[in-house]
Image: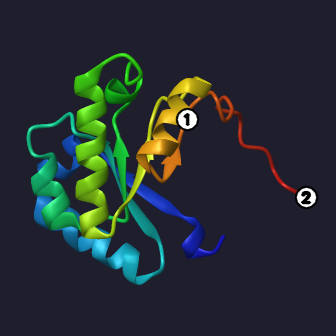
Amino acid sequence: VEAKKICFEITETVALSDLKQAANFFSQLREMGCSVALDDFGTGTASFEYLKRLHVDYLKIDGSFIREIEGNKLDYVIVTAIRDVARSTGTKTIAEYVETDGVLDLLIKLGVDYGQGYIFGKPEEITKSE
């Protein structure tokens, strides 16, 4: 598998244990051509600190902000703010928990780069390709 096709994700709990070591490790991964995603962005106490120090390629917007975005103004504002921060740093956004056409349409209008969730397909077992 080509390195450019591999994306490593980090959660706040992993990064919290040793932020400097995580930053060095991700720098090495990116030098090899892999990409790096900061998972569950927006839910932790130090999310913006991680964004500042880890230099990731993707911010995965936590599903807790996506599930009710159609009817919850605060979720809408938070997702918009995360998108704006990501754009200002050249980071792509991925919305987790995209499960309905309405949510997908709204995220497209907001300019979120990618989506992840059952609307695209449920998780499947990895099978050997021929």
x, y percent for residue 52: 14, 64
Q: Which mark is residue 130?
A: 2
Q: Which of these two is toward me, 82 or 32?
A: 82
Q: Look at 48% across and 43% down and name the residue there.
A: 109
Q: Nearer the viewer, residue 72 or 52?
A: 72
Could you give the CA–CA distance between mark 1 and mark 2, rounded to whole angstroms? 35 Å
Question: Is residue 38 found left or right of 2 in the rendered image?
Answer: left
Task: Tell me where residue 31 sits by quadrant.
Answer: bottom left
Residue farthest along the front direction in this orientation: 109
Residue at the (51%, 44%) spot, across then down? 108
Which quadrant, please, contains the C terminus?
bottom right
Image check: 94 left or right of 87? right
- SS assignment at label 2: loop
Quarter residue 63 falls in = top left
Q: Residue at 21% across / 33% down in the picture?
A: 43
The disc at residue 105 is 1
